[in-house]
Image: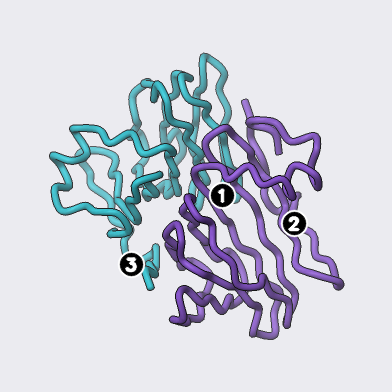
Chain colours: A cyan, B purple
Amino acid sequence: MEVRTLRELVRFDVERKQKIPVFDSPHLYYDLYTLLPGQRQRPFAFKRSDKIVYVLEGVLRASVDGEQADLTAGQALWIPAGAVNSLENAGREPVVALVVVAPHPECAKRKKKHPDLRPGAG
Amino acid sequence: MEVRTLRELVRFDVERKQKIPVFDSPHLYYDLYTLLPGQRQRPFAFKRSDKIVYVLEGVLRASVDGEQADLTAGQALWIPAGAVNSLENAGREPVVALVVVAPHPECAKRKKKHPDLRPGAG
């Protein structure tokens, strides 16, 4: 059985926000994002994939097609395919968020960074 | 922006476990499952959809193709399409779990129970 204890996977990097794969499947990916204060994911859109962000720790400033909200632990945000979105830690504490993207966009960049990823593997 | 505060959606039912839609999109659904001690989801399999269960509260006994594990808060389980799985609250405290299923299986039963669901709507 493919079980992950998320707190064991959490790590931060002072250079940039971290995307930590938890599960990759043919249908979706499931990642931890970690952002230190001031770190961000620049605006972009998945053409064909929906994205849901669930905040585990900290305060995450999210922008979707020009609208903005500060999400606190226990809040979830749905970002539809095609919507330009960005994420930023605008607070003083580290942010940990659980992000699911489906269908799996199979980005070349992701494959290059994590060549060992396979369905179900974290 | 489609933001949900999950604790505001949590409810329990002494009659049976609850599946509480948070988001439905063309590509996935994202639910809260709540189970009081002794409540369970009987064994079944999605033919073509993967399922990921993340435990927010309590201890959830999960079975996947005959293997069993007790998941505690902060643990995630990947259930691949086709795998027979069941979930049970075998502990003494209520269980709250966040469940994503992709691609959206568009079950007739779900549509009947939640006729108002539409992409992005909780």
Mark 2 — on which chain does it sit? Answer: B
Kind of residue at badge 2: Val
Frontmost of labels 1 and 3 is: 3
Q: Are marks 2 and 3 on the same chain?
A: no
From the image, tell me which residue sits under label 1. A73
Residue B81 vertical placement versus B94 (above, below):
above
In percent of width and height, residue B96 lies at 65, 65
Looking at marks 1 and 3 on the same chain, the residue that comes earlier in the sequence is marked by: 3
Numbered disc 2: secondary structure: loop
From the image, tell me which residue sits under label 3. A8
Residue located 61% across and 69% down the image: B57
Quadrant in the picture for the C terminus of chain A = bottom left
In three-dimensional space, the C-alpha distance between marks 1 and 2, rounded to whole angstroms, equals: 15 Å
Quadrant in the picture for the N terminus of chain A = bottom left
Mark 3 — on which chain does it sit? Answer: A
In percent of width and height, residue A103 lies at 42, 37
Q: Residues within 10 Å of mark 2 (few under 14, many from 20)?
A: some
Residue located 53% across and 57% down the image: B46
From the image, tell me which residue sits under label 2. B10
Numbered disc 1: secondary structure: loop
